[in-house]
Image: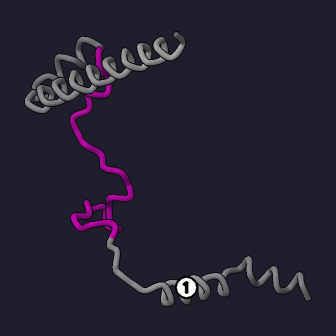
Amino acid sequence: MLHLLYILAFTILAVVAVANLIRNLIWFSFGRENNYAANSSSMANQGGFPYASRKQYVPHPELLDDAGNIIKEPLLVMRSINVDDARQQLDALYEASPARKSETSEES
């Protein structure tokens, strides 16, 4: 009897989760079609979204170069190296670190 109760409870939870997923997908698809620039001033005046009253977009500082211009290139570039090269680079970083130098002086 308890097994049936668990199955019923998890079935109800699964149905609620799937319904919520579908509702959010529909809501986001309609939300992308809306023009937020036209609605931002009316929403800001109503007090619903006070942050929408800002007109200027301020990017995150990591997306700016030294001159303050927006970087338009990828921020993460990965290249393929083999395991031995990676191990040698990590060993070189470890040997050059200040913590490693203080450990060797304490051991002496």
Instruction: Residue 90: name its quadrant.
Output: bottom right
Q: Could you tell me what secondary structure mostly forms the magenta stretch?
A: loop
Left or right: 107 as drawn, with respect to 20: right
What range of the chain is rendered magenta? 48-76
Picture coordinates of residue 17 (x, y %)? 33, 23
Residue found at the far front of this picture? 1
Picture coordinates of residue 93 (x, y %)? 60, 83
Question: Which is more toward the observer, 8 or 65?
Answer: 8
Picture coordinates of residue 10 (x, y %)? 42, 20
Determine whether the residue tagged by mark 1 lies in a helix, strand or loop. Answer: helix
Question: Which is more toward the observer, 18 or 55?
Answer: 18
Residue at left offset 32%, top offset 72%: 77
Which colour scheme appears in the figure?
Answer: one colour
Residue at left offset 74%, top offset 81%: 100
The kind of residue on which mark 1 rests is Arg
For the C terminus, which image quadrant?
A: bottom right
Left or right: 7 as drawn, with respect to 37: right
Instruction: Residue 72: name its quadrant.
Output: bottom left
Q: Is residue 108 above or below residue 29?
A: below
Residue at left offset 40%, top offset 85%: 81
Q: Which residue is mark 1?
A: 87
Q: Is residue 64 above or below residue 7?
A: below
Q: Is residue 21 above or below residue 3?
A: below
Residue at left offset 38%, top offset 58%: 62
Question: Which is more toward the observer, 66 or 49?
Answer: 49
Q: Is residue 19 magenta?
A: no
Residue found at the far right of this picture? 108
